[in-house]
Amino acid sequence: MPHIIVEHSKGIAKTLYIQRLLGNLHEAAMKMPALPTGGIRTRAQSFERYRVGDGALGREFIYIIIRIGQGRTDEIKREIGDTLFEVLTAFTKAHFDAGNPLSLGLEIQEIEKDWTWKKNNIHDIIKGKN
């Protein structure tokens, strides 16, 4: 864990390079000790059909869902959310400053330990054990 899922309106990808945002988020996550590098998954999902606010054309959104395993303190979760939201707001600053309509959001969801199944050898590969 975590899974960093970037949901976005299709139109915003015409203005902002979403792959770069994914890279920025992934790199920031790798720097946080609370997030094991071998478990980080960062991906985007574009929505072709959507409405934002009053539904007027040109209203765009980026919403990040961070899914993490249980057990982190509220302080650590706040640090994760603050750090990754700062990456998002820095990435979109010029877009906002130009007055383009854009809604941003981020939430953290905890995955219950009893209801997740995993198999991952990436941790060992990163550590050179495989």
Image: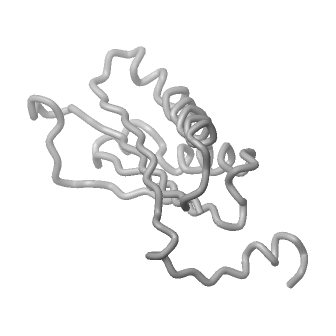
Compared to residue 130, the image places residue 99 above or below, namely above
User: Which color mode does the image show?
Assistant: one colour
Q: Position of residue 99 (x, y in %)?
A: 32, 16
Could you say which quadrant of the image residue 100 lies in?
Answer: top left
Percent x, y for residue 56?
Answer: 10, 31
At which x and y percent is residue 107?
A: 41, 43
Residue drawn at x 49%, y 59% as measured from the top left: 43
Determine whether, in the image, residue 76 is placed left or right of residue 107. right
Return the residue nearer the eye: 45 or 65: 65
Q: Which residue is drawn at 90% across and 75% down?
A: 128
* Residue placed furthest toward the right: 128
Where residue 26 appears, x then y in whole percent? Answer: 63, 51
- Kindly identify the residue that appears in the image at 49 percent across and 28 percent down: 89
- Seen in the image, is 102 located left or right of residue 110? left
**In the image: residue 124, left or right of residue 32:** right
The quarter holding residue 70 reads bottom right
Which residue is at the front of the view, 70 or 36?
A: 70
Instruction: Determine the image quadrant of residue 16.
Output: top left
Q: Residue at x 65, y 48 (%)?
A: 29
Which corner quadrant holds the C terminus?
bottom right
Q: How many labels does the image show?
A: 0
Quarter in which the N terminus is drawn: bottom right
Position of residue 118 relative to residue 30, above or below, is: below
